[in-house]
Amino acid sequence: MSRRVRLHAIAHARAGDKGDTSNVCLFAYEPRHYPALLRAVAPERLRAAFPSLLRGPIRLFPLPALHGVNVVMENALEGGVNASLNLDGHGKSWSFLLLSLEVELED
Amino acid sequence: MSGLRIGCGAGFASDRLDAAVELVERVPLDWLVLECLGERTLAFAHRDRRADPARGFDPLLERRMRALLPRCRARGVRLVSNMGAANPLAAGEATVRLARALGLSGLRVAVLLGDEVGELLGPDTPLWEGGTLGERGAPVGANAYLGCEQLLPALSTGAEVILTGRVADPSLFLAPMVERFGWALDDWQKLAAGTLVGHLLECGMQVSGGYFADPGKKDVPDLARCGFPLAEIEADGVAVIGKTPGSGGRVDAMTVKEQLFYEVHDPSAYRTPDVTADFSAVAIEEIGPDRVRVSGARGRPRPATLKVTVGFDGGFLAEAGVSYAGPNAAARARLARAVLVERMRSVHGYAGPLRIDLLGLRSLHATALPEPPESEDVRLRAALRAPDREPAELLLWEVEALLTCGPAGGGGYRGRITPQVTTASASLPRTAVATRVEVVEA
């Protein structure tokens, strides 16, 4: 059986910014969901989900011992806090943007 | 207890004060660190100093010091802070004046000077973001990120209070460890261990339950009275992260993990002026309630150059909004948006950047996700940036005019114009940056 859930159901996250680069680190609540978390944030999936936001290179840094992954997205903050007209110019809420992604779970 | 106890009593300029008082009162600290200086905060401070040469330091310095100095002195807690911002000497003098008024005679403040490096840069200085400084415009200020090496002479004066301008945030925590344990400045493993502790503490409650709660998923006890964190560090660099006893919040593997990679890119190369730290094999162990042991940071030699942040005038940001609620609110808000776009673009010929969000439909994530069809409580929020005030004032006028000239039932207009700064980064050779320490006494 497989089912689709939002990442929010299986992971928690925090976002940080440096210039126009956003980093979101995500951690699976349970180790068994770590592979699904990694699948969900694959760069090509992120770009397909948010094409008009994510315009630059995306790098993943897996943190297997902590069942987490650090996602570093360049040119992903609409110019960053220097230039963005977004209410959230730091992209603090990008953590929950990524947690809104859907992922397939094999139970 | 052989360890060194360092508490964090502020992790950003607007951080809480009552929780810092509580930390000092309830924990026998050796050091209290107040980290209050963001990149843009410093650029604003340069502008304050330009307007009044006696200012340019943290506007909350006196309030924080009034509450904390007497308590720190009574308990033998030394205090280090970057609240000196663009004018550390004036901050030192203000602290000494306050100490005299509080009857804390003999209190010594060591002021670290020399982070201001505007004179060392020229129009040809390359910027990390691309291009040169000259192409970007006239800087309002430029400061090098100083490290432990520059900060240590201030500590060794024995002063109770150390005030700085720009110092890398983790270095504010690392310097007391280096002073206590006598770590060599090329003992990369120890410096990495101490940098890990500094990185975990530098954002205050972000490691002790702040910025963490997600009701039903990640609950935090008594968030309104969240406690600031502290670390107990041993001579080998292994540390236990905790928080004010009896306070709200939580310290556990989850809160520590989230903060460990906050604003980190490559976890194996976290660069500070002191060391290149590798956090990729850090071990996080819960050893008791609200007690987490952290170890396993590895170090490599520090970067050859110092990072410099350059601030520039950023013109004006205009933000204005009006709200619609009840039946058909979303359609009325969309009509208001269309009217505003036509007014700004066609009637007034404004061609600069303009953003209009519909709060309640989609705003923060509007670029990333499509707009849902319905909501019965929607706020139009318009924003633009411009080098001068005229387009900013025009936007406020046009949004307010939507009250009588726009769709039915609009209310709750607010608008404001705020001066902006922008920042860019550059590098300087370490040898170019000369620092000195000045001690002032109450």
Image (spheres, coloured by chain):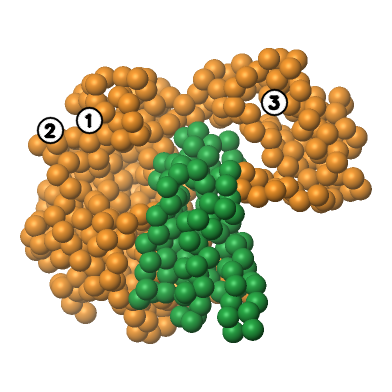
Chain colours: A green, B orange
Residue at numbered disc 2:
B432
Image quadrant in which you'd find residue B39:
top left
Chain bearing mark 3: B
Determine the CA span between mark 2 and mark 1: 9 Å
Residue at numbered disc 3:
B396
Q: Is residue B195 visible in the rendered structure shown here?
A: no
* Contact? badges 2 and 1 (CB < 8 Å): yes
User: What is the crowding at mark 2: few (fewer than 14 residues within 10 Å), some, or many (at least 20)?
Assistant: few
Residue that appears at 10% across and 62% down: B187
Q: Earlier in the sequence, mark 3 or mark 2?
A: 3
Residue type, numbered disc 1: Val
* Contact? badges 3 and 2 (CB < 8 Å): no
Residue under disc 2 on the same chain as residue under disc 1: yes
Closer-to-camera residue (B29/B349): B349
Q: Earlier in the sequence, mark 2 or mark 1?
A: 1
User: What is the crowding at mark 1: few (fewer than 14 residues within 10 Å), some, or many (at least 20)?
Assistant: some
Vertical placement of residue A29 versus B402, above or below: below
Residue at numbered disc 1:
B117
User: What is the crowding at mark 3: few (fewer than 14 residues within 10 Å), some, or many (at least 20)?
Assistant: many
Residue that appears at 47% across and 56% down: A43
Q: Earlier in the sequence, mark 3 or mark 1?
A: 1
Residue that appears at 71% across and 21% down: B344
